[in-house]
Each structure stands twice: as structure tokens, then as C-alpha cells.
Amino acid sequence: MATFGIRWIGPTCCLGLLLLQGSVSHGAGSVGLGGAEADCRVQDPNSQQVVRVLDRYARLLRQGKAPDPLDQSTLEALAQLLEDPHFVPKLLPPLLDVLGASGGKAPGGPFKVGAKGTSARALRTLVRRMLGAGEAVTPLITGLSFGVVLNKKEELARRKTALNVLQSRHLSAGRQCLLTVGRSLQDPLRPVALMYSAGWNDPALDRMLVGLLGEPEVEGLVHPSVPLLQRTQADRRPLGKGARKDLQPLLSALMAGPDWRDTVRAIQMSRGFAPEDRIPILIDGMLVWDQLKRAKTGSRRVTNDFARALSDISGRSIGTNPRNWIQWWVSVRQGKIPMHKTEREKEAPRTRASFFGLDIDGDRVTFVLDNSGSMDGVLSSGMTRHELALEQLFSALEGLGEGAVFNVILFSSGPPIYSGDMLKPTPKNIARLRQSLGARQPGGGTNLRPAIEEALAHGPAGKIDPKACMPDTVVVLCDGATGSGPGWVRDYLDRLLPVLQVRFYCVLLGGQGDGTLRLLAEISGGRIVSPKAL
């Protein structure tokens, strides 16, 4: 097996060697790009030799191969060369190619860097440690920022990788790159910069994210609110002062209706305020939607989301009447009671509609029910799982109440069976549904994903259309592992939820499950139950 090594003949740079201590040591048997394909033995510290090795390493990674580790002398030489402004421009392209060779989609964002292999991880560690030394590695910082990230002629993949490296250390140069790229409307790197900005808790970046709400759409993002939603969800510290000043009138306008999805997003974005500033915003919005409810144009889903947000702050369950919350807030301001109750009160039911103990608080509900062969299994009560599911369904429909609508989807092995347009839960409609579902006996497998796509009017690569998506709440019942497994759920919901704002309530009936229902409920802010004694 061939060994790649560099014998450094010049003055040793202490910083580079110091940064390498504790990173990677392959020992006496270490190798570089082994095998006949990569026989590169060198004796002189020539930057071109390092470039050639990194180029080959990146190529092998892109081909899905696992190159042998680079030896310590190579890493030491690279560390020293990266401190010299003359060599940095030559070394960065192949280095970034290695670091970005396995880039992909990150949770909540369009891109992340994830280099494979021992040496790729060692290179990432080396670069991050060097950046941690600050001004001592100005050539590297300058090369990454001005030479790559802000250079629109550079390959987009390298720009993404360089931006990831800079912002991950929260360097001032990384912040400036995020601001510059984030404000450049035509830069293809913009959506990446905006998503990274959500993780900074920086006043200027916060204000930039709030400014996105004034854009009808942002290229590369499913909705302009996505970065701000992620910022307020991942970091509960308040937004910067300027961002809060800009955001407050926008929230008031969004909460004034009539689009329930805008209001739900506004409730979520209000997490960017401290509790004492957020509470009046929520109560004002709740009053608006209470008036809409009295005019028969309100939304139970919205009203319940206001109540849930206030309950999360206060630890109290006061219901959906805004006047009760006003009275509570007055008492808090007068010092009669604390803002947050230490022992959280048990939440009172917000609706008469219940499905296996799950309160259904939406107005437009789609029930997605397992109709696979295992649903024919007999429970200790003597009922089959299928019969119990239908009993719970009809009970829930009778409790939905005035103004609510529903439909039902059955899934097994083949295409989902869909009841069609939303119906009012009248006795006549429920009776017809009872007759129709009673004639469909369980059979086949558990192909859940197409049923979810049907419920949301969205296939794997389809356009996200809020007007086509009828429900605000999806209730899913399944009795075990699903045909597709859970791997698709997070990426799918990350794309759809910011636009559709649908919430999932899930029932795992009997079996162990595979995590699919848990993810649907957890990511969407819903709940999952698994009835045990059946």
C-alpha cells in the first residue's frame, strides 16, 4: 500500500502544529491515498502536491469510495500552508471539495457539510481549530470569505461549504457574509445564508429575517417565514430590539385575519418576544378571532392555538375565552398572582370531539385510517381493531359540532380510498359514511405515505398549494410499522408545514410502530397516544 507523506524542510510554524495536536494520529502504519491508483510519495513541501492529493481525495469521495487516511505529515504541511496568503487561494478549492463531498440537506435548512472518512473529518477539525485562533489565521478567513463565499464566480458547492465553515465558528467574517449574501436577492447562495442566520441570535441578522416577511416569496425557500420560524423555535431568547420593533405591527396585521394559516404562523413567530411583551400581542389577536367566531367566520384551530400559547407561558388552563385571559393578565400586572404557575394545571378539553382520548381542536379534519389485514385482529373486548377504530371515528364525528367539516381516507396496500370533499358531520352524512365504511373489510399491507400525500393534496414532488390542502388537522390511526418506514417524514414535513400549517394527531393501535406516527405528531406540534388496555 502506498504512503503519501510530506517532509517539511523549512521553518516549522508552531501554530499549525499546535492546532493539530489531539486531532488525528494514524501512527507508523498510516497511509494516504493508498493503492496503485494513488502512489504519491513526495519529499518537498510543494503546495501543488498537496493540491493534487486533495483533488484526488475529493474525487474518490464523490465516487462513493473510501480513500485511505492522509498521514500526519500531510496534515501538518497543510496547516502551515493555510497560514500563508500566497498558498491559501491554491489550497482552498480542493480542500473545500473534500469537506463538501458529502453535502446534503440539513434539518430546517437547504444544505449542510458532512465530509466522510477519517481524513475528511481531520481536515474539518483542522480548519475549525485554525479559525478558532482568530486573527492569527487572517489569510484563511479572508480566503474563505472574500475569495470564496462572496465570489459569485466561484462554484456554488464551494461557496456553500465555505459559508458553513465560517458561520459554524460564529466569526465576525461569517456574520458579514451572512448579511451580505442574505441581502443579495439574486444570489443563489441566499437561501443557505438565510437559514444559517436563523441560528445566530444576532440583532442585525434577526432584523434581516423579519424583513423577509415583506417579500411575497423568497427563491429557494418554501415560505418567507421559514428562517424566522426556525429562529424563534430553536432559540427562545428574544429577537433583537430592532427586529422586535419591525415585527410587532406585522404580527398584528397577520393576526387580524382572515387567513388562519397566517395567524398560526404569527402565533409561532411571537416567540421572538419576551413573555411579558408577547402576552398582550396574543390576547389582542385572540380578541380579533373571538369576534370572527361570533360572526361565524372564525377558526377553532386558531382560537385553540392562542390558548395553547398562553397556557405554555402561564402554566394555566383558562380556556379559549379572551376575557378570562385579560382578567388573568390584569391580576399578573397588579402583582396579585405570578405570571407562571409552577405546578402546571391540567388542560381542560377544548372540544367535545375526541378520538381515543385525543381532543380534536380543528375545524377541517381529515381522518386517515389503517385498513390493512392486521386491523382484523380481535381485541380482548371481542371487537376487532377495525370495529373499534370505526366506533371511535363516529363518536368523534358526532362531537365535531357546528361549523366543522371532515373527510376520511383508508389505506392498505393499494391506492388510498378517499371519501372526497369535506362534509358537515350531520346525522345523514355520518349514516352514509357508516354504511360505506362498514362494507370495506380490512386487507393488505400498511402503505401510509400515499394516504398522507392524498390528505395534504401533495405528492413527493408536487407543488405545495394551500388552497388544495383542505384540512387544518389530520388524525392518523395505524396499528404497527408502515410500509415506507419513518425516513421520509422529517424532510417531507420540513417542506410542507411552513406553508400548510397542518397538525397531526396520531393513534398507534396495538403494535410497536416504527416511529412514523411519533414524527408526524412531534414535528407538527400534535400528539400521539398508544392505547394499552384494549
Image: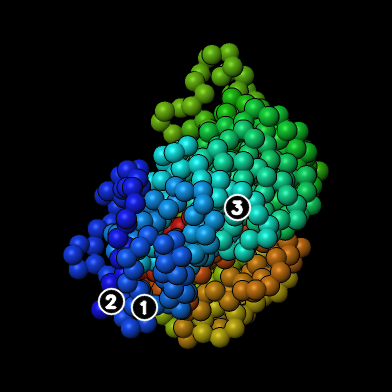
Is mark 2 in CB contact (under 8 Å) with mark 1?
yes
The amino acid type of the residue labelled 3 equals Gly
Snapshot quadrant of residue 263: top right
The amino acid type of the residue labelled 2 equals Ala
* Closer to the camera in the image, 448 or 200: 200
Point out the tag, 2 or 1, that comes first from the N-terminus. 2
Confirm whether residue 188 shows in the render. Answer: yes
* Closer to the camera in the image, 134 or 213: 134
The amino acid type of the residue labelled 1 equals Ala
468 versus 233 height, above or below: below
Point out the tag, 3 or 1, that comes first from the N-terminus. 1
Q: Residues within 10 Å of mark 2 (few under 14, many from 20)?
A: some
Q: Residue at x 51, y 69 (%)?
A: 488
Q: Residues within 10 Å of mark 3 (few under 14, many from 20)?
A: many
The residue tagged 1 is 38
Tell me residue 475's x, y (percent). 56, 63
Judged from this view, the residue extending furthest toward the left is 28
The residue tagged 3 is 147
Q: CA distance from mark 2 to mark 1?
A: 7 Å
Q: Residues within 10 Å of mark 1 (few under 14, many from 20)?
A: some
Q: Residue at x 51, y 52 (%)?
A: 86
At mark 1, the secondary structure is helix
Looking at the rendered image, the quarter that the N terminus falls into is bottom left
Q: Which mark is residue 2?
A: 2
Q: CA distance from mark 3 to mark 1?
A: 29 Å
Tell me residue 209's x, y (percent). 67, 43
Q: Residue at x 58, y 63 (%)?
A: 157
Left or right: residue 162 versus residue 24 is right
At mark 3, the secondary structure is helix
Tell me residue 187's x, y (percent). 71, 56
356 versus 478 height, above or below: above
